Image: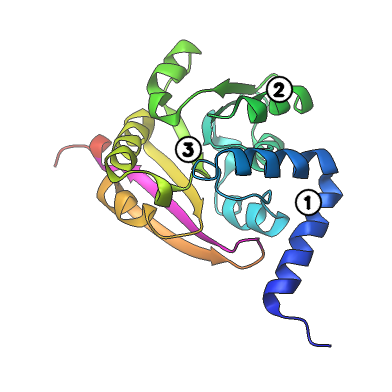
């Protein structure tokens, strides 16, 4: 019997999620159905998505990284595996359930896990003694945000990045692209099929608000 591409993708994602443990999968589903507009997907990120998203960056040079929407921590743990010993990783999520989970399963002194809104990233960073971020990684679904809030969030994000800072995003839709193009000097795009759902990928560099005057 022929098996559709969608069925193979779903079966692969289910198997990979089960391989990480049923607790991760149950938490992801519970938080998604509690607030589907704030959680990008009920399925945790796949290994293929993580590798494709993080591969272009030299993480050994990063000192401060911010993650929006860490969820069950798939990207969080991959980032910690790549970051140097002196780096700090600030993970911000509106779900207290996700943050409690991160704190419990990720005993790494470099991780600062905060229950709150990414809109308040500047205040959260200041409150934890963090300076400018070298990189922001976002899994927040910009397509479900009100346009004015999405614009404010991108402005706030650009404002906390270093002059050569980067904004990375993995998204089901393309709503974030015009926001990135307005705020960053360079935006590169990609697409990853090996995830449920497949994702558009974005790597933006050098926030325009911090560009030196000519």
Task: Determine whether the residue tagged by mark 1 lies in a helix, strand or loop.
Answer: helix
The tag earlier along the polypeptide, 3 or 2, is 2
Q: CA distance from mark 3 to mark 2?
A: 20 Å
Label 3 sits on residue: 136
Which of labels 3 and 2 is toward the front? 2
Which of labels 1 and 3 is toward the front? 1
Which span is picked out in magenta?
195-208
- Indicate left or right for 105 with 83 as reference: right
Residue positioned most to the bottom: 1
Residue 63 lies in what quarter of the image? top right
- Indicate left or right for 213 with 121 as reference: left
The tag earlier along the polypeptide, 1 or 3, is 1
Tell me whether the residue at label 2 lies in contact with that at label 1, contact meaning CB atoms closer than 8 angstroms.
no
Q: Quadrant of the N terminus?
A: bottom right
Q: How many marks?
A: 3
Instruction: Residue 31: give x, y in percent of width and height.
Output: 64, 38
Q: Residue at x 65, y 42 (%)?
A: 75
Q: Quadrant of the C terminus?
A: top left
Q: Relative to residue 99, is residue 193 depicted above or below?
A: below
Q: CA distance from mark 1 to mark 3?
A: 25 Å
Instruction: Residue 165: give x, y in percent of width and height.
Output: 41, 38
Q: CA distance from mark 2 to mark 1?
A: 20 Å
Instruction: Residue 29: give x, y in percent of width and height.
Output: 69, 45
Q: Main secondary structure of the magenta part?
A: strand
Label 2 sits on residue: 103
Label 1 sits on residue: 17
Task: Determine whether the residue tagged by mark 3 lies in a helix, strand or loop.
Answer: strand
């Amino acid at each position: 019997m022929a098996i559709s591409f969608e069925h193979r993708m779903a079966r692969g994602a289910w198997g990979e999620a089960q391989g990480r443990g049923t607790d991760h999968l149950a938490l992801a589903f519970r938080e998604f159905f509690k607030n589907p507009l704030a959680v990008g997907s009920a399925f945790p990120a796949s290994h293929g998505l993580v590798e494709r998203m993080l591969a272009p960056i030299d993480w050994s040079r990063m000192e401060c990284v911010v993650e929006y929407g860490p969820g069950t921590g798939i990207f969080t743990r991959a980032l910690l595996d790549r970051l140097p010993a002196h780096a700090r990783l600030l993970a911000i999520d509106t779900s207290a359930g996700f943050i409690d989970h991160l704190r419990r399963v990720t005993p790494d002194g470099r991780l600062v896990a905060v229950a709150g809104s990414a809109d308040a990233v500047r205040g959260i960073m200041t409150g934890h003694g963090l300076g400018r971020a070298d990189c922001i990684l976002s899994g927040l679904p910009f397509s479900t945000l009100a346009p004015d809030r999405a614009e404010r969030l991108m402005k706030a994000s650009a404002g906390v990045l270093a002059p050569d800072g980067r904004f990375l995003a993995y998204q089901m839709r393309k709503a974030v692209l015009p926001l990135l193009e307005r705020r960053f000097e360079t935006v590169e795009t990609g697409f990853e099929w090996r995830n449920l759902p497949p994702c558009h990928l974005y790597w933006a560099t050098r926030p325009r608000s911090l560009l030196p005057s000519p």
